[in-house]
Image (tube, grey):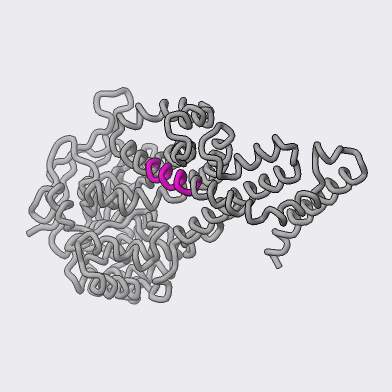
Amino acid sequence: MKWVRNVLPPVLVGLAAIVAWELTVKLGRIAPFILPAPSAIWAELVEQKQNVWEAALASGTNALIGLAAGSIMGVLFAMAASRFRPLAEISIPFAAVISALPIIALAPILNNMFEATSSIPRRIVAAIIVFFPVFLNTLRGLREVNPIHQELMHTYAASGWTFARKVRLPGALPYVFTGLRQASSLAVIAAVVAEYFGGLQDGLGSRITSAASFTAYPRAWAFVVGACLLGLAFYLTTLLLERLAMPWRTRLIA
Amino acid sequence: MTAVVVDNVTKVFNQGRSDEVTALSDVELTVGDGEFVSLIGPSGCGKSTLLRLIADLIQPTTGSVTVAGKSADRARRDQDYGIAFQQAGLFEWRTVLRNVELPLELRGLKKSERKAKAEEMLALVGLADFAGHYPAQLSGGMQQRVAIARALAVQPPLLLMDEPFGALDEMTRERLQTELLGICAKTGTSTVFVTHSISEAVFLSTKVVVMSARPGRITAAIDVDLPARDEAARQSEKYFEHVTAVRQALRGVPAKSAT
């Protein structure tokens, strides 16, 4: 019952928005070549489902590899930075400056550094974008240790490594996942948008630009829907992982 | 051999700064093997500080602390004591059972051994049915009982407790006091116990150490000699005599700004 109460309102609002969109276009307020009707996008999505699926698979693979690499680097760097204070003091301003840069702007440069058939540039862009939220959140989590836990481990004469493994890391998990939640959507955006700037053209991004340049707007929108679903799949998978990794937390989606 | 010797210890915090505080001044304390010593006094009298010095969580400014015949530092690294704080301080990502197992784990016990030991300790504090729960699912009092089970799990020769029963209801408190005495008697554990409660101090202790604040120092040490420590003892005349003695010792302290 509670589940229905939580899920029903957003679903109803979403449906109402789609109906309103359809009616606006159908009643001639907006030309279909500017904004296609949802029904046209849907028809295109059904027709192109094989293409959408293959493009999503290519972009999804890039996003996943970038996400995994960026997250692993983020967690490892955060562990190093929390262990050696000077490292944190040096790296945090750098992290702040670099994360303020539009990293997607690196895509054209990276595309030129590798050969045209390489998927590596897109994966690097995704990894760099993922790195910062994971690094900063994990570092914060690793630093926030309950003082009683610290004293207790001190009385157990636990070594620095034991303390990191048994207290710091599990204590930082909620923060790691906060970072991962942001990062999972960012990874998909990065993998899709990086294709706008050249490189291998087999993902959703290139399909969107090519459909748009042929003024095949319903088809472009169909691929946008595919990108949206891909981002959602990444986000929900992260939520699921979070629940599996932290069974002691009963409330999650909040 | 004596469990704890605190020899002429002074502890000054923030030494040489404008907010310098003398937490303890010229403290002498001896806890014999198997003795149960309570530290009682107003807030700010340094009783927790004294306990933390014994635990080697802080170091004395002058003087020395000896635990089980070794330096406090050596004793800590040999895990010669178990400790329970005012707050339970459980690890929220571990189940109740795995919380109690932690000190055993760090001692390198086998999985089956530490599980059996932890289950025994949980049964002792009446939480056998909650082994698989997470701390967030327990009440504050239950969490504190888990913390006590954890302190007892390694069966240390010395038990350090900083108001461990403060958050518990009166019934649980009295039951755990009796349990604690049983465990100490059975295992010969020496105990240093910080408390605010006169009746708790008298019921549990062989010696009640009364402290006063600013600077923290020991003003009296009252030996408590009860023939038995059971429910009847709580009503006995001798018990009330000791309660009165401790209360007078606490009042005898010039109660400057005791809070």
Position of residue A182 measured from the top left corner of the image (x, y, whole percent): 54, 43
**Residue B102 located left or right of residue A140:** left
Position of residue B78 measured from the top left corner of the image (x, y, whole percent): 14, 55
Position of residue B98 measured from the top left corner of the image (x, y, whole percent): 34, 65
Position of residue B190 measured from the top left corner of the image (x, y, whole percent): 19, 62
Which of these two is toward me, B43 or B167? B167
Q: Residue at x 26, y 66 (%)?
A: B153
Which of these two is toward me, A219 or A39? A219
Q: Residue at x 27, y 46 (%)?
A: B211
- Looking at the figure, which quarter contains the N terminus of chain B? bottom left
Q: Report whether residue B247 is seen.
A: no
When the figure is inspected, residue A244 is found, relative to residue B235, above or below; the finding is above
**Residue A50 located left or right of residue A31:** left
- Looking at the figure, which quarter contains the C terminus of chain B? top left
**Residue B63 located left or right of residue B132:** left
**Residue A218 located left or right of residue A127:** right
Q: Residue at x 33, y 36 (%)?
A: A81
The residue range painted magenta reads A63-74
Q: Report whether residue A64 is seen.
A: yes
Which of these two is toward me, A56 or B34? A56
**Outermost right residue:** A27
Task: Say if the magenta span includes residue A184.
Answer: no
Q: How many marks?
A: 0
Q: Quadrant of residue B129?
A: bottom left
When the figure is inspected, residue A64 is found, relative to residue B175, above or below; the finding is above
Which of these two is toward me, B159 or A159? A159
Magenta segment main secondary structure: helix
Task: Say if the magenta span includes residue A73.
Answer: yes
